[in-house]
Image (tube, coloured by chain):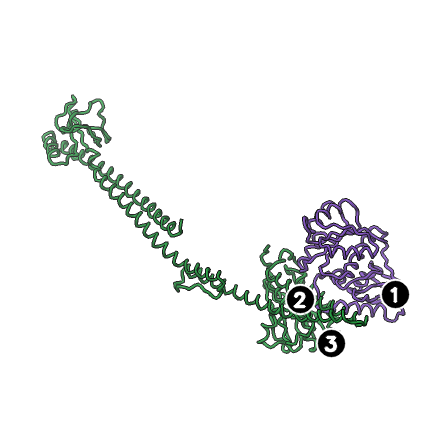
Amino acid sequence: MPTTLRIALLAGLLALLSNLAVIGFIYGRTHDEAVASLHRQVVEQAKVLTDVYRTGGWPALDEAIGDTLAYADPQTAVALIDSSGHEIEGNLAQAPALQSMQEGYRSAVVRLQGQPSPHQAEIQLSRLPGGLWLISGRLVGEGLAFRATLERSLLLALVVAGLLGLLCGVILAHYVARRIGNIAAVANRISARDLSQRVPLSGAGDSFDRLGMQVNAMLDRISRLMEELRLLTDTLAHDLRSPASRLRAAAQAAAESDDPAEQEELLNSVVRNADALIRILSTVLEISRSEALTGRNQFSWFDVSELGAELAEMYDPLAEERGAALRFDRPKRPVPLFGHRQLLAQAISNLVENAIRYGSTGGEIDVRVRPGDKQIRIEVADRGPGIPLERRQEALKRFGRLDSSRSDDGAGLGLALAQAIAHLHEGELLLEDNQPGLLIVMQLPVHPPQRSR
Amino acid sequence: MGRKILLVEDDRETASYLAKGLTQEGHSVEQATNGQDGLFRATDASFDLIILDRMLPVLDGISVLRALRAAHIETPVLILSALASVGDRIEGLECGSDDYLVKPFSFAELLARVNALLRRRESRVGPTDHRLTVGDLEIDPLSRSVKRAGKKLDLKPREYLLLEYFARNEGRVVTRTMLLEQVWDYHFDPGTNVIDVHVSRLRRKLDEGFEKPLLHTVRGAGYMLAA
């Protein structure tokens, strides 16, 4: 069943149901009204007649009953019965038995004079002085006759409401189908590989526009990721070419060489270049893993300042060898963090290695752990040349090493990995000015991120 | 002193290359090519060491390892794996393996780790003499004091741990990765020669002024402490 038809039927059904409820209510109310008004009329008439008798005596009552029969509508039933059970006056074809007489209001079946069959009626029985009984009432069926008309009208209304609902449903369904159709059409064109398509917005700011905006935002992100991926694949292919070709050259030279010493030298170069290739591949893998947020199941609580101290101690001799003093400001208290200790160790070591590689000319490297209420800042600062503001974003990209020669042994992935690990912890990697030098901040939220997978 | 080693590896080329190398070292090597067969052999006979590939047909390496440990078979297990990320290494170690080696590796690296694991098994059942001696070097693990030729050496805490690890693997090659994993407990590849710098510092304190060096560099493999 097509969606349009389903929506139309649903709308029709809803209209029918809601109208049914309203009509049921009206029907119930009019029934109650009719019964109540009948009761009022019967009681009123009986009261009038007894009052007439009480004030005017027999002649007055006789006249009043005569008037009632003459002028009132044909539903009226009146009878005056004497103590022996005879109908003195009235329009009942047969008087009820005296023994069954009891004062009060009740339903009864009566036959009027000149009518072939008895009718349901509401009557009031009143005992008058002198052993007389007054029966005053109205026939029920004829009294509620207008209800038949009412019922017909209501039924008709119900049918009309149902049809109108169905019509509204069709219009509504067409509207929805048109709005959704726009989005579906864009999705179709995207499936046909045109990622530049966007959902047109009506500008009304309604749910359809919001859906469209969300789809557009999603498409923007997908485009960015695709672009990043394409760039990454290009640079990866490019960056793997140089160690791979060096490896090939060394292997070939080794195969052609006769000098054993030279051969060994060349084979060592083969191994070194193969290692470099493997390291690039592992790091790229590690970055994708962290960006995909895998590894959160290995999170645990640990003291960041302890880790910082450990790594500072580990890299101190290396920095010293390159002519820089590495200092670590240890906070007075432990700085607990819920995270991946091994990956954070790698991230911090990458930052320190980066500082040693590019900033040791400045003579000092500072490693700091700064606890805060909401965020922990892990800082690595050097006094080297720094990175100009406009090139900082580039430095964080995979293979975004800033010297174009690419002769250095660092593959330019260190900062990108540190950033990916920061993202794994819902944090950020910030490059700032150390005036002079580079200040790299790993800013991590204190609150543990939601565990995923 | 040959040992019994079970090698569970489905790649024929790797398996025959490893088996050949280990046999040349004097060990007897039994081979299995899938996880189920490997588990069967491991529970049937007693081995000194099991080398277990992580990705195996029929039953993967981690499942084999879990089954072994559940059956209280405490034979040392060395996992080989192409799954190289830090998370994979941690996961492999947390499953009860004794060591985790990432492919590709050099045979020297594998041999060093095999020897370290076999030595650990030996010292577990051997007498427990706390004092370690290598030539004229004396190490007291309880007081963490080190003497060479009766003269006390002043070592930093990490230098001491490094030396103790070397001493416990006396006469065996220890690789840089083993040092990083065992002495520092880090499971990533540093992009610098940071480990070498530490070893050369230790060597200065240990060997400077003595005629016979104790800490040797083994080309293409790592280091060795030997008298």
Quadrant of residue B182 in the image?
Answer: bottom right
Q: Position of residue A59 (x, y in %)?
A: 9, 30
> For mark 2, does the 10 Å Cα neighbourhood hold few (<14), some (14 to 19), or many (20 or more) residues?
many
Give the letter of the chain under mark 3.
A
Q: Which chain is purple?
A: B
For the residues beneath circles 1 and 3, the answer to whether they share a chain is: no
Q: Which chain's residue wears label 2?
A: A
- Element class at badge 1: strand
Q: Local crowd at mark 3 within 10 Å, few (<14), some, or many (≥20)?
A: some
Which residue is identified by label 2?
A280
Q: For mark 2, give the secondary structure.
A: helix
- Alpha-carbon span between mark 1 and mark 3: 31 Å
Residue A286 is labelled as none
Q: Amino acid at mark 1?
A: Arg
> On the rendered structure, is B116 left or right of A40?
right
Q: At x 41% / y 64%, what residue is drawn?
A: A201
> Do pointers 1 and 2 mark residues of a single chain?
no
Q: Of B143 and B37, which appears nearest the observer?
A: B37
Q: Which residue is mark 1?
A: B148
Q: Are marks 3 and 2 on the same chain?
A: yes
Residue A75 image point, x, y percent: 17, 34
- Circles 3 and 2 in contact, beta carbons < 8 Å: no
Q: Position of residue A73 (x, y in %)?
A: 14, 36
Q: Give the vertical position of B151 relative to A139 (above or below).
A: below
Which residue is located at x 71 percent, y 59 percent? B102
Q: Which residue is mark 3?
A: A323
